[in-house]
Amino acid sequence: MIDVNLLLAWGATFHNVRKGQVLFCEEDRVHFYYQVVDGRIKMCNCNEDGKEFIQGFFGAGESFGEPPLFDGGNYPASAVADEESTIIRLRKESFLQLLKEHYHLHAGFTQMLAKRLRAKSLILKEISSYGPLHRVATLLREYKKENGFLNNELFKIDLTRQQIADMTGLRVETVIRSIRQMQEKGVLKIEKGKVYC
């Protein structure tokens, strides 16, 4: 999202994080802007029973946890390294000043946040209004679109069945059944346990 050299010029620092390391927790106060250099970060919520709901995954070049930088609230979800990763972080005050001095970056953030809000609205509608097959299909379609692939292009979904369940509020068994049904209908392909749509 933001050029790493520009972030470094504003005082950002690199941090290596191991798989499973928590960067911040839901309801923590916000102190930094975060961007992934390499690896993958997961944003999630857990209920009192330990059931996880995955808000999203963020890879190289993507930022995460931005809304409270703008609204002054606390983090709405926790951020956990889904694999060994390198992130770069910049103090909140420096980040906001950077945006003031670089309007094109501010406009880019506005556009990116609007796209994420639109995708969240769609997923919430699916979860509250439709059955499992429709939920899984919508999630896979949106995931494919987020990764820059068109509907007619074959794309390998790099999410586990458990992650799909955690992103749709379904049980993993239900996700497995839904994926099989989608394969039978020709909506997707399964090769060596990997899902392509």
Image: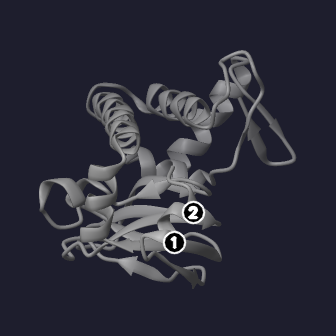
Instruction: State how far apart marks 2 and 1 are (Cα).
Output: 6 Å
| Depicted 170 relative to depicted 82: above or below | above
**Relative image position of residue 29 (x, y in whole percent):** 18, 75
Taking the image as shown, residue 40 lies to the left or right of residue 113, namely: right
Q: Residue at x 51, y 34 (%)?
A: 136
- Where is residue 69 drawn, in percent x and y? 23, 60
Q: Is residue 14 above or below residue 36?
A: below
| Apparent side of residue 57 relative to residue 186 in the rendered image (left or right) | left
Q: For the view shown, which residue lies furthest in the left direction?
A: 72
Q: Under tag 2, what secondary structure?
A: helix
Above or below, 113 against 59 in this view is above
Residue at image point 34% right, 77% down = 24
Q: Position of residue 192 (x, y in %)?
A: 87, 47
Say which quarter of the image contains residue 126: top left
Work out which quarter of the rendered image holds the C terminus and state it: top right
Q: Nearer the viewer, residue 47 or 119?
A: 119
Q: Which residue is mark 1?
A: 8
Residue 12 locus on image (x, y percent): 46, 75
Residue 171 visible in the snapshot: no
- Circle number at residue 4: 2
The answer to whether any part of residue 106 appears in the image is: yes
Secondary structure of the residue carrying numbered label 1: helix
Task: Please report contact status of discs 2 and 1: CB closer than 8 Å, yes or no.
Answer: yes
Depth check, front residue: 61 or 55 = 61
Residue that appears at 46% across and 56% down: 63
Label 2 neighbour load within 10 Å: few <14, some 14-19, many 20+: some
Q: Is residue 77 above or below residue 192?
A: below
Using the rendered view, name the quadrant where residue 11 is placed: bottom left
Query: How many numbered marks have been drawn onto this rendered protein structure?
Result: 2
Residue type, mark 2 in image: Val
Amino acid type for the residue under numbered disc 1: Leu
